[in-house]
Image (cartoon, rainbow, N blue to C red):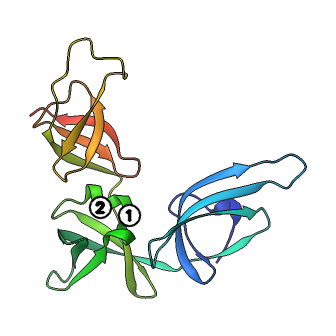
């Protein structure tokens, strides 16, 4: 199936110069006396490299034929992330950090994810959009500390740091949008 430039939306898989890519961002650019273009930020699914390209409205792409399969995240060791197949837990595979990109910040042991397969080979995983994490380090909120809009940085159980409202404390469980890395809500008080 072919895709027009306007169909290149977030998380769309397509073929560019013979390689599979996933769309990370798109921006429509309209320049005076020139044809409008679409600026696409995309990640190569084979080597993890991120590219930005401008495409004309007339450009057409082949949709990447990807399959999805449920997998479970096991653990990380030396920049390699290990997973098992949900149907065959004894069968394991690894993915490198550069392939997974920023999603490594939100990989939690035993989380079930969707693996993306291209030509029968697993090339990346998709995290659930919203996930819950325990806050393991949080600075105390200082009275009158609302100059930054009432936000502070905390560390969650995966080791990632995120911005949260001042009322979040160590031990709280917070819901995070894994696509944006943003705080959504507090799930439970610690």
Q: Residues within 10 Å of mark 1 (few under 14, many from 20)?
A: some
Measuring from the top left, give residue 12's x and y in whole percent: 54, 65
**Which mark identifies residue 101?**
1
Q: Is residue 45 left or right of residue 77?
A: right
Q: Residues within 10 Å of mark 2 (few under 14, many from 20)?
A: some
In the orientation shown, which residue stands out farthest toward the top?
144
For image coordinates 24% across by 74% down, the residue present is 80
Say above or below: 18 vs 23: below
Secondary structure of the residue carrying tag 1 is helix
Measuring from the top left, give residue 179's x and y in whole percent: 40, 52
**Which mark identifies residue 62?**
none
For image coordinates 21% across by 70% down, the residue present is 72
Measuring from the top left, give residue 65's x and y in whole percent: 52, 80
Whether tag 2 and tag 1 are in contact, CB under 8 A, the answer is yes
Q: Report the quarter where the C terminus lies.
A: top left
**Which mark identifies residue 104?**
2
Say above or below: 176 vs 36: above
> Where on the picture, by quarter, is residue 174?
top left
């Amino acid at each position: 199936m072919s895709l027009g430039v306007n169909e290149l939306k977030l998380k769309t898989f397509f073929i560019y110069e013979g390689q599979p890519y996933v769309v990370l961002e798109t921006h429509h650019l309209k320049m005076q006396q020139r044809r409008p273009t679409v600026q696409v930020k995309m990640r190569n699914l084979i080597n993890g490299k991120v590219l930005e390209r401008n495409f004309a409205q007339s450009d057409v792409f082949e949709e990447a034929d990807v399959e999805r399969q449920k997998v479970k995240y096991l653990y990380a060791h030396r920049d390699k992330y290990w997973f098992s197949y949900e149907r065959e837990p004894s069968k394991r595979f690894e993915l490198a950090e550069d392939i997974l990109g920023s999603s490594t910040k939100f990989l939690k042991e035993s989380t079930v994810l969707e693996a993306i397969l291209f030509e029968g080979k697993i090339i990346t995983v998709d995290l659930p959009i919203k996930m819950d994490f325990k806050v393991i380090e949080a600075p105390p909120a200082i009275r009158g500390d609302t100059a930054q809009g009432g936000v502070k940085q905390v560390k969650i159980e995966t080791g990632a740091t995120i911005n949260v409202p001042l009322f979040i404390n160590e031990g709280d469980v917070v819901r995070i949008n894994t696509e944006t890395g943003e705080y959504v809500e507090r799930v439970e008080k610690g």
